[in-house]
Amino acid sequence: MLLVRDVRMLDGRITDLYVSDGVFVSEGDASDEVIDAERSLAVPGLCNTHTHAAMTLLRGVGEGMELDRWLNEAIWPLEGRMKKRHIEAGMRLACLEMIRTGTTLFNDMYFMEDEMTSVVRDMGLRAVLGEGLIDGFDMEKLEREQRRIPGVNAEILKRGGGLVMPSMSPHAVYTVSQEGLRWSREEADRIGSGTHIHASETEKEVHDWIERTGRTPVRYLDDLGLLQKNTVLAHAVHLSDGDISLIAKRGASVSFNAISNMKLASGGPMRFRDLADAGTNVTIGTDGAASNNSLDMFQAMKVSSLLVRNRYGASSVPPGEILRCATVNGYRALGIKGGLIEEGYAADMLLVDPKHYSMTPGHDLVSNIVHSISPEAVRFSMVNGVVLMKDGHVPDAERIVDMAQEAAMDLIQEGV
Amino acid sequence: MLLVRDVRMLDGRITDLYVSDGVFVSEGDASDEVIDAERSLAVPGLCNTHTHAAMTLLRGVGEGMELDRWLNEAIWPLEGRMKKRHIEAGMRLACLEMIRTGTTLFNDMYFMEDEMTSVVRDMGLRAVLGEGLIDGFDMEKLEREQRRIPGVNAEILKRGGGLVMPSMSPHAVYTVSQEGLRWSREEADRIGSGTHIHASETEKEVHDWIERTGRTPVRYLDDLGLLQKNTVLAHAVHLSDGDISLIAKRGASVSFNAISNMKLASGGPMRFRDLADAGTNVTIGTDGAASNNSLDMFQAMKVSSLLVRNRYGASSVPPGEILRCATVNGYRALGIKGGLIEEGYAADMLLVDPKHYSMTPGHDLVSNIVHSISPEAVRFSMVNGVVLMKDGHVPDAERIVDMAQEAAMDLIQEGV
């Protein structure tokens, strides 16, 4: 992080960053845009490595139910009725929230992701969109998905303009057949994308999977070739020592979802320190707003820090490590050179007001970003050198909120 | 919570609350002030039942140290150098942060509280200020404090204008002698105040105390008469079943400090559900910003909810229960009729914009307040019918931040 005076960019890459006492990074004079950022704090944009953005439309639904009842009685019936207009309204609301709270890149898993590409492009965020694959061990369903999903990905690539990319996103070992998982991996290799999958989220999942296959979900995924450098394992709470060695050896990334896991009562045994010490690329995610209930990555960093300390001790994780998980590690997991403010890295950046109360005093600015900042202190947000939020304002915010509220009411009433 | 049109008050009590479909509460026509609150959401002001407000000046100091080293090497040396100007700057910054994040009443324990009374009055918050008593088992020191503290309390009463009140605040069983604790109780009775004490914060404290006295800190405090209706036990993480029965039987309140306890790695075994089920008045506190690192009670509610669910299950605590802990239970603990929006209750209230992204969609407004709200959505804050924040702005915010930054630098440099 740096106190900057102004920022110059060319073609979405940082070229010059003027710090208050001189030039920090320079690559010539040509500049697309100059932002007056006198004494702002430049912070890399945050990367949310696991979410279901459109579920923001379901924020607060079925509050307080256990995971099984919550999915079966509250979430799935509503999702079953969701049409494009609902998903679009949820995605737009999610993008607004992510921009306002410092996210510049997110890794999504949901449905109609081809249709959502233009929404994300319009909002300006960088994203990896994964069309969720669930075959329920039904080979006919898998065949239909094998015919459908490549088209979805082609459409994302076509509309994404290099900022929005597809991924293969089989839901989890207990919802996708071996054939479906293997095909996901092959298809990812074919299109050069990563894979994104829920793994070892609950004790029950791991217990059931060992009983059914004799292997943990992580080892099972590895046997099918899914543990690779561009794989993101979401949650990965309940891990054996063997799982941890395997993840590290394969170079797969883990998305730590502290808030969602605590809220759904399965976060206690998470093994952040063991994973990171084994050399795993640990990143941070929010999960969907239905189980968080927000997409605020500052809050996700703070609760991650709290949960690690509560388990491993008060000095077990310095704030700088948490910040790296939420920035450069996230970008790395998604195969993007970003998350650092350095020459040649993507110009995905926040400008923070160091004179906001929540950043004062400035004894330890990194700790303030991780443990005390209010999103209100983020004044500018830019992705690929384009400004998405200017002085705290995201264009069209009121209209997006109104549309989301209407779509949510429409969705609920359809079921009445 | 209510969707309101406008709010009328008389002498700091709510008289009329016009909801969108008619009058909710009315006690006559006379009104001091009318706030145009068309379709705002009226939420009771939040009560922070355990903090050391002036420590906001030490936010981020000694990040990542274990509790013992953190206190001995980072915090205490700086506190030893703190002069009135530092404490005042920290208190003002804390009040700014508390107002911006929805707190209307706080229960403080620190030093120079008599001097701080005018600062708090000036900022407009309601508060209970407790001059910290530490005698270190030194009878001469206790005598000096016995001569000094009654004067501090008299001064708080005199300057407090009924909004700022004193409490007796012996620090903890391991820092205050039996004589000091007993005297605190007698003095509290004499001036009609409550008592505020740290209790059973760490496993070590409880273990050491049982070894030293044969009793848990809670039982020991009860034997000295300190467990009463107007007692606030801060932290109270490591409790036996006997402790819980005793607290409930005496009607003492507990201040649950989830964030601080997790950050200092001692929050896991907290017994929220057992305490509440035994009938204890459970409330929520942030602790000081040095160990949180913010005073945001919305965040404190969310992390409280997460920690309870993580331990007791996803359906173990409805959001409404958490909101009550942070409002009416807190007011009750401090002996003030407030924390509910009802006729005759203190006019300490927030007006929230239900159209903020963080409150959208409105499937469950109480859950949104507890789990997703950004403090930015709080537009108005009032205490005793006086508006402290208008449309998101707290008067003098910039000057308060500048003063705090200067005082913090001055404090650090004095030690160089």
Image (cartoon, coloured by chain):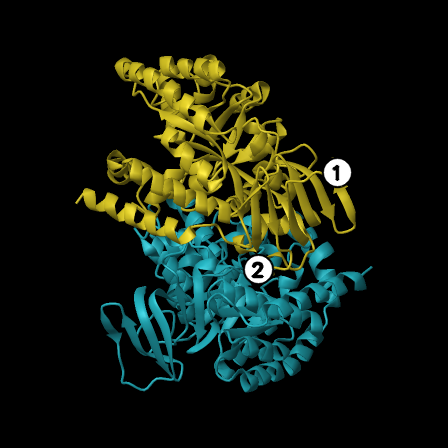
Chain colours: A cyan, B yellow
Q: Mark 1 against mark 2, which lies toward the viewer? A: 1
Q: Residue at x 26, y 48 (%)?
A: B409
Residue B137 appears in view: yes
Q: Nearer the viewer, residue A370 or B154?
A: B154
Residue A265 appears in view: no
Find residue B26 and name its label. 1
Looking at the picture, which amino acid does disc 1 mark?
Ser
Residue B76, percent from left and from top:
27, 35
Q: Nearer the viewer, residue B382 or A399?
A: B382
- Which residue matches tag 2? A213
Find residue A48 and name its label. none
Using the rendered view, name the quadrant where residue A147 is placed: bottom right
Q: Secondary structure at mark 2?
A: helix
Residue A177, percent from left and from top:
62, 69
Q: What's the chain of the residue with tag 2?
A: A
Q: Nearer the viewer, residue B154 or B367?
A: B154
Is B307 on the left or on the right of A112, as rendered?
Answer: left
